[in-house]
Amino acid sequence: MKKSKITKNLCDVENWLYSDIVKDHFFNPRNILLDEADYVADGVGIVGSPACGDMMVVWIRIDKKTKKISECKWRTFGCASAIASTSMMSVMATENGGMTLARAKKLTPESIIERLSGLPDRKYHCSVLGQNALREAVLDYENGS
Ligand code: FES
């Protein structure tokens, strides 16, 4: 029996478009928060819309002494690229003692994509979701709400 073109493309792992790092963060997402009921955050950022499916929530905790991000949790209804991008973003925000708030607000999708060893061009917007939600969470913390 002959495979349809669509089935062949879906199963064509040799032509997989994603890097090993993207695959790792998609299958083993870091810092994901599945139940926020008991989680006390210092700032929360929400971007996107549940109506169109691309929604992202980021929760941050700030180290009161260093004023750096000590925890960065997230949850999304976005695609695999959004999951991998935000997982990497959460690692970048908290590694090496945590990111300063100024640096977190200037984090770019390009820097996340670079750490992922690339994303297909049409998936660029997926990496913007987590980065924007992180900025919103920092602004939420700074505004004291
Ligand atoms: Fe919309 Fe990735 S988040 S396609």
Image (tube, rainbow, N blue to C red):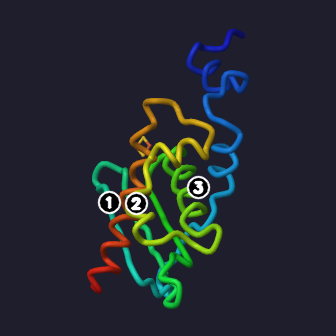
Viewer-proximal residue among 46 and 50: 46
Q: Residues within 10 Å of mark 3 (few under 14, many from 20)?
A: many
Label of residue 47 in the image: 1
Left or right position of 128 against 20: left
Question: How far from the left and from the top, in percent, is residue 84?
Answer: 57, 50
Q: Nearer the viewer, residue 113 or 1?
A: 113
Amino acid type shown at disc 1: Val
Choose mark 3 or mark 2, whichever is in front: 3
Residues at circles 3 and 1 in contact by the CB criterion of under 8 Å: no
The structure residue drawn at horizontal position 37% and vertical position 71%, both measured from the top left corner, is 137
Number of the label disc, if any, that sits on residue 144: none
- Residue neighbourhood size for the residue with mark 2, other residues' Cα within 10 Å, grouped as few (<14), some (14–19), many (≥20): many
Is disc 2 placed on a helix, strand or loop?
strand
Q: Is residue 19 left or right of residue 61?
A: right
Name the N-terminal-most of marks 3 and 1: 1
Ligand 1 placement by image quarter: top left
**Residue 37, percent across and down?**
47, 84
Q: Which mark is residue 56?
A: 2
Residue on which disc 3 sits:
88
Compute the Cα span from label 3 to label 2: 14 Å
